[in-house]
Each structure stands twice: as structure tokens, then as C-alpha cells.
Image (cartoon, helix red, strand yellow):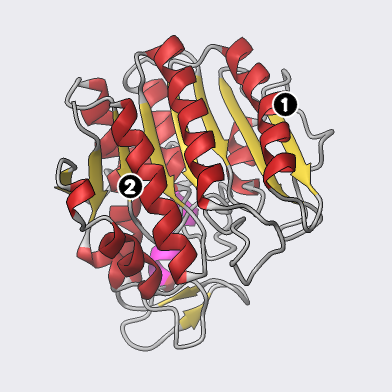
Amino acid sequence: MTTLLYTHPACLAHDTGPYHPERPARLQAVLDALDGPAFAALDRREAPEVDMADLLRVHPRAHVDAVLAAIPVAGLRNLDPDTVVSPGSRAAALRAAGAVTAAVDAVMAGEAVNAFCAVRPPGHHAEPDRAMGFCLFNNVAVGALRAHLVHGCERVAVIDFDVHHGNGTQAMFAADARLFYASTHQWPLYPGTGARDERGAAGNVVNAPLAANAGSADFRFAVAEFVLPALEEFRPDFVFISAGFDAHSRDPLAALNLFEEDYAWVTDKLTGLAARHCAGRVVSVLEGGYDLEALASSSAVHVERLMAAG
């Protein structure tokens, strides 16, 4: 079976202004990279708008209503100093989350072993009642809870290799031993969470912070020493990846030194573990990555390795 690719043109219409790093060109760079002959076998699907019931498993109704009401009919509006919305943001946000739930349904139905959701805005900073860090709704958490509560996956894991800690996902998972969150990230760095001693209610949170200027060897050690053993012990029924590519050496927003080979390596490790524990079920969701060239090449190798695992 091939890998599924979920995206939608609406995700390009989320306008954050001319100088914002989380800009439509990011997603276009990813889609252009996945348009070559090496990716001809991808099963390309249009992301639907998320069902409100799925969104409300993660975010309170009052918060969802407030975010959607804040979207302007013209121009731009700041939800916080970093998080900007525009008239196209509603459809983009709903389809970004909907891509993940649709991917979960398709993988659980056996239509593919894995999927990549090329969407924006990203999601892993979005807390239950707070949009922040370029994120409106927590796309990966929405998908994870659908796998858990609708499809009956007892143990659901999210692995996050974005350079910034996914505070929103951790906040949603930490109190529930059936949900597992692991993150490698630069620390200290925005948003200020993700210390190693943040372990969750039942050791179900694993943070592997990396110092500025850490490189491939440090990253691979952190994954092999901390993330993978804990994930093996957890024995997930479904694996999600928060796939941020801003730990790349070229990225302007942080100071780690990863390369395309590192993203290929970690993708192979995660798909291999998924093959052992959950019939290969993986849904990967685009998070950060702000150097267009590095984002394009890194997402391409990530999807290549997902396809190889399928």
C-alpha cells in the first residue's frame, strides 16, 4: 500500500502578513518538493473540514467559538504577538485538523499503512483553551483523540521532533496514561516548556531537550536513549508524528544542526517501531520549518521513508 498525502488549497490562503515566518510559501515549498516523479505513487487526497465533534474533544466550545469569531472579514488580526489570522484562516484551520482525522480514518480502514498531512497552520503549540505560537487548533491531538476514542486505539503516541517543544500536545496528554508524548527540542527556547523532569502523570511524557548548537549525534542519542525505549515500553496502537523541520541547520528560528539524513533516520526508527507494535499505523503532521529549501528537502526525505515503510 502507498502513503496517503492530505492537503488542501485553503491551507495556502491562511495569510499571516508579508514578514511572518509561518507563511504560505512554506506549504507551497513542501507541495512542490512532493510533486516530483519519486512521489508519483502517493495517494493524494483533499483534506475535509474537521467535524466539530472531533475538535471539541480537544478544545472547549467557548474557545473554538472565540478563535473562529476572531477571524476578520478583511485584513489581518493578531491573536497574540506571534499568531495572526486573516479571512482565509477559518477554512485553513478546519481543514488542517480535518486532514489528520481523515488520515486516521483511512489508515484504520486499511486504505494505507501511513499518511502525511501537508497542512497549515501548524498545531502543536495550541493548548486546550489558548491559540499561540502560530497555532490555532492542535491538529495532531485532534487526530490522536479520534484514534483513541472513536477507533478504540487503547494506547496512542505522538512523537514530536520540531525544534520547539509542543507545549499544547503535552498539556493535553500529560494527565492520561493511555496517551504518550515525546519531544526532542532545543532548550531553553520558546515556549519555555519541555524540561526533562516534565514526565506526565504516569511517565507518559518524555522530554529530551537539546542545547543550542547540538547536532546529529546529540539528536540521535536523545532519540535512541530516551524516546525509543519509552515508546517501546508504551507499545502504541497508533503512532503520530509532529513533523517540524526547524531543527535543520539552515533554519533561522533556532540553533540546532540537523540534516536531511537525520530526518530519514528518525522516520525509519518510528516506522519500524510502528511495524512491530501497531501494523505500521503512522500519521505524520507538518509542524514548523522556516527555511524553504531545508523544509522542502527535509519533508521530501521524510515522505520518502514513509513510502518505503508502506
Quarter of the view holding residue 230: top right
* Quadrant (top left/top right/bottom left/bottom right) for the N terminus: top left
Q: Which residues are magenta?
A: 61-69
Residue drawn at point x = 47 percent, y = 40 percent: 264
Q: Is residue 97 above or below residue 66?
A: above
Q: Residue under circle 2?
A: 117
| Depth order, front residue of 32/125 | 32
Circle 2 crowding by C-alpha within 10 Å: few under 14, some 14–19, many from 20: many
Label 2, secondary structure: give it: strand
Residue drawn at point x = 33 percent, y = 41 percent: 304
Count of numbered circles on the image: 2
Q: Is residue 56 magenta?
A: no
Q: Is residue 269 above or below residue 219?
A: above
Query: Three-letter amino acid code at disc 1?
Result: Phe
Of badges 2 and 1, the one in the foreground is 1
Q: Residue under circle 1?
A: 226
Majority secondary structure in the magenta region: helix
Percent coordinates x, y for residue 202 in the rendering: 72, 18
Judged left or right of residue 191, residue 155 is: left
Percent coordinates x, y for residue 143 in the rendering: 39, 36
| Depth order, front residue of 188/123 | 188
Q: Is residue 63 magenta?
A: yes
Label 1, secondary structure: give it: helix
Percent coordinates x, y for residue 44 in the rendering: 16, 47
Residue drawn at point x = 28 percent, y = 61 percent: 31
